[in-house]
Image (tube, grey):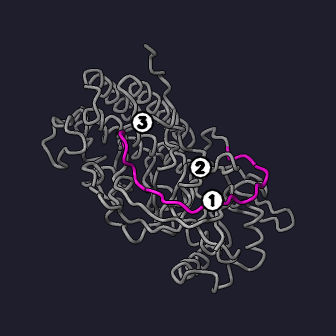
Amino acid sequence: MTLEPLTADAPDMRRASRDRLSVALMDARNHTLHALGRLEAALGPALAMPLRPADVPPPAWVAGHVAWLAEYWIARNPRRALGPRCPRDGVRTASVEPGADGWFDPTLVPHAQRAGLVLPELPALRAYLLETLEITLDLLDHTADSEDALYFHRMALWHEDLRGEELATLAQAGGVSLGLALPAAVAARAPVLLPATQWTLGWTEAGFALDVERGRATLAVPEFEIDAQPVGWAQYVEFIDDGGYDRQELWHPEGWAWLQREAARDGRRGPRYVDQIGVASGAVLQTMFGKPTRMSGSQPVLHATWWEADAWARWAGRRLPTEAEWEIAAVHAARQGFRWGDVREWTAGTLRPWPGFEPAPWAAHAELDAQGVFGRARVQRGASFASRARMKHPKARWWALPERDEGFVGFRTCTL
């Protein structure tokens, strides 16, 4: 019999067995503690304070919330074996940390109240992270190797990886290096032409998936041409040089209103963290983790809003891809040079549920209840250089409101 390899950071971890999950959960917690240590060394007491933009949570809160969510739905949940059928508001046992609910339960502590929270000092926070992991792993050792039984352990891993990427965006906001390698400059490739096809969106196989990834929608997709790689800085600088930020006709009306507010506040004429623009070279100087960094013309654009991505596409006489087009290319066009995984990518899609959608019981406790932003948030596909490899799946679906730019987000386009 061939033993399953214990690879902790592989794209198939959404359906990992008990043994692989154990290794991956330890790996994820080490990743969280490493980021927390670097942030503490640089920020000191500010670790517990919100960074800009003001509505993002304090880094210490994010780390504590990771431990709290896993404990709440695994160690404290007597009905965890029901998996996704588990009721949201069932009975819970006490936390190992008496103050945990008051600090880290987002249904009790909304965003507006977190700036004034007195969070535990880092040694106590680290102890909570380590103790809850030990309990989670001990329970996992005694868990059946079935889909329902492993559901919340897989959820805990996915959530910690997601928050690990969020800690990276907070490090970027705070000017703290986490030692991440930025996307490489790549040679331009010709756009990819893909034939008309029928395509089914939605996660229908075994393993963990977000509620907005589940369901099933089969579409007829006409032939389309899509960029082989995300739009690079040289292409974006041409848009800026051509007056893209001053031409109202290029912008969605809501995007133009957003731009006017931003321009009045800080003179915005480019994506977040851009300090200088080299029109001749197509390069920009962008502050990355506290260090002014020359981003070459062939590196992908970072920290763009959906409004900016949509305006660039209009200026170029192109359009953002649909979710189905992006997914088809990610699955079938790798040999034609289709490159993804350096930045999360905006698509044309507005976030809506697919047929068969059922809200996850834990989503509100993770602040991932998408129902409140259906029809407003825009869909992102792919993953970024700050994502763990096990997060990188072509069917992965994420979202954000169109004005959000703190994430490591870019875009690519299709022909009209």
Image quadrant where one finds the C terminus: bottom right
Q: Residue at point 42% right, 44% down?
A: 60
> What is the C-alpha distance between the residues marked 1 and 3?
52 Å
Task: Please rate how many residues cluster around mark 3, counting C-alpha atoms within 10 Å: few if below 14, some from 14 to 19, many from 20.
Answer: some
- Give the mark, 1 or 3, whose residue is nearer the N terminus: 3
Task: Give the x, y percent position of residue 193.
Answer: 67, 60
> According to the image, label 1 marks what residue?
194
Task: Give the x, y percent position of residue 176.
Answer: 60, 45
Q: Quick check: is 45 in the magenta stretch?
A: no
Task: Give the x, y percent position of residue 80.
Answer: 21, 36
Classified by dominant secondary structure, the portion drawn in magenta counts as loop
> What is the C-alpha distance between the residues marked 3 and 2?
46 Å
> What is the C-alpha distance between the residues marked 1 and 2?
9 Å
> According to the image, label 3 marks what residue?
122
Label 2: which secondary element: helix
Task: Give the x, y percent position of residue 230.
Answer: 66, 58
> According to the image, label 2 marks what residue?
332
- Give the mark, 3 or 2, whose residue is nearer the N terminus: 3
- Give the mark, 1 or 2, whose residue is nearer the N terminus: 1
